[in-house]
Amino acid sequence: MSMNFQRLPEYLRWANRRMLESMKTAPALEQRAWEIAKHLLEAEWLWLERLQGRVCNISWPKEVDPAELPNAVQRNASAYADYLARLGNSSPLVTYANSKGETFTNSAQDILAQVFSHGCYHRGQIAAMIKRGGGTPVLTDYIFYVREQR
């Protein structure tokens, strides 16, 4: 059974926007939350570059300007929508090197699943930090996005 990722770009836009807005509600939000948010968005971009056969390396963000993150959310969602429109129903094999220079080959479908699950993991971490920082975390689970679209 193959997975259809056509909703992924809009889900990423929806979940990442909600995450960023919710981060603003925490008066004592630790800086690490902003680093994780930037990492999440940079990793989305890195995987998209790999999917398209381009080399892209990122390191853990050391400085974060929260004002720049909404632009990355928009850029990523739009770029994934374009990529998926070109991809259609295919799932080609993609060969890429990780940050250690090790080479791997995975299907586009598996890489898209990685993008989806990696973001969910980090948005969960950030939600816990928002709560600890006195803010109001929001639900960003995919099923809530789907329900909201009806």
Image: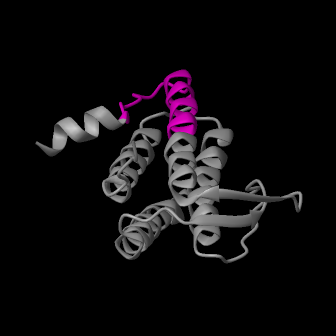
Instruction: Please name the residue shown 37% across and 56% down the image.
Output: 13
- Relative depth, front residue between 101 and 56: 101
- Relative depth, front residue between 70 and 14: 14
Quarter of the figure with residue 19: top left
> Furthest residue to the front?
1
Q: How many marks?
A: 0
x, y percentage for residue 137?
A: 41, 29
- Relative depth, front residue between 75 and 35: 75
Is 68 colored magenta in this rendering?
no
Highlighted range, magenta: 120-141
Is 123 colored magenta in this rendering?
yes
Quarter of the figure with residue 135: top left
Instruction: Please name the residue shown 55% across and 22% down the image.
Output: 132
Quarter of the figure with residue 64: bottom right
x, y percentage for residue 86?
A: 39, 76
x, y percentage for residue 53?
A: 65, 76
Q: Can residue 65 be seen by looking at this rendering?
A: no
Q: Can residue 10 be seen by looking at this rendering?
A: yes
**Relative to 136, residue 48 above or below:** below
- Relative depth, front residue between 128 and 24: 128
Instruction: Please name the residue shown 10% across and 42% down the image.
Output: 150
Image quadrant containing the N terminus: top left
x, y percentage for residue 105?
A: 71, 59
Indicate how the structure is coloured in the image: one colour
